[in-house]
Amino acid sequence: MFLPTYVDPRKLAVQGCLLDGRVSAEQLSRLLSSVASICSPLEATVTFSVDESKAKIACGVVRVSVITICQRCLDEVQVDLQAEFSLQIVYSEEQAQQIASNYEPWLVVDKMANLSEVLEDEILLALPVVNYHPVGACTGDAFVDALDADEGSLVDNPFSVLKQLKR
């Protein structure tokens, strides 16, 4: 089942709704521009509720598999992304400044909000800065091992001359 693109998060929080479903890859344009390709639809579970302080919140988990470029060998590598989130639904920037530290603000000025965009934001934050194949599965591992072996040698180190001058 696909998740609705637009929801009324305040109404869902008051009702205590649970949304479980998918977002199609076509709706994830910012994620698609950040990776080589998206392997599967984004899967999400979002629980809307009201906490003890009467704050309307949305908590959940989002998962997706993407193809990125390995920074060692420059071949494609599949990365499974998962992010957990806890958002407090706020009306204004001022209210966003006053939320509890265990929540991130979700600024919803109008009645309806774009749920797909929020889920895409969370998965974009989960993207690793640098992507690699697992150790032993990368064709660039031989190059990394050669670099590690060279680091142990002080003879080739251009700063070894400075060490001699220090004496």
Image (spheres, rainbow, N blue to C red):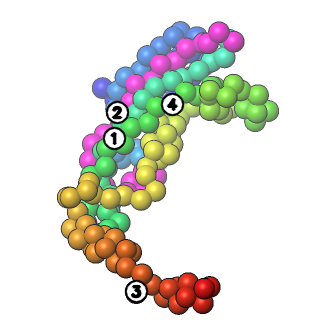
- What amino acid is labelled 1 in the image? Val
- Answer with mark 1 or mark 3, whichever residue precedes in sequence: 1
**Residue at which label 2 appears:** 43
**Residue at which label 4 appears:** 85
Q: CA distance from mark 4 to mark 3?
A: 51 Å
Q: What segment carries the magenta color?
A: 30-53
- Answer with mark 1 or mark 2, whichever residue precedes in sequence: 2
Q: Quadrant of the N terminus?
A: top left
- What amino acid is labelled 2 in the image? Glu
Rate crowding at label 2 as few (under 14), some (14 to 19) or many (20 or more) other CA atoms within 10 Å: many
Q: CA distance from mark 1 to mark 3?
A: 48 Å
Q: Residue 38: percent from the left, percent from the top? A: 31, 50
Determine whether 82 is above or below 14 in the image. below
Q: Are marks 1 and 2 in contact (CB under 8 Å)?
A: yes
Q: Residue 126: percent from the left, percent from the top? A: 45, 44
**Residue at which label 1 appears:** 64
Foreground mark, 3 or 2?
A: 3
Q: Are marks 3 and 2 in contact (CB under 8 Å)?
A: no
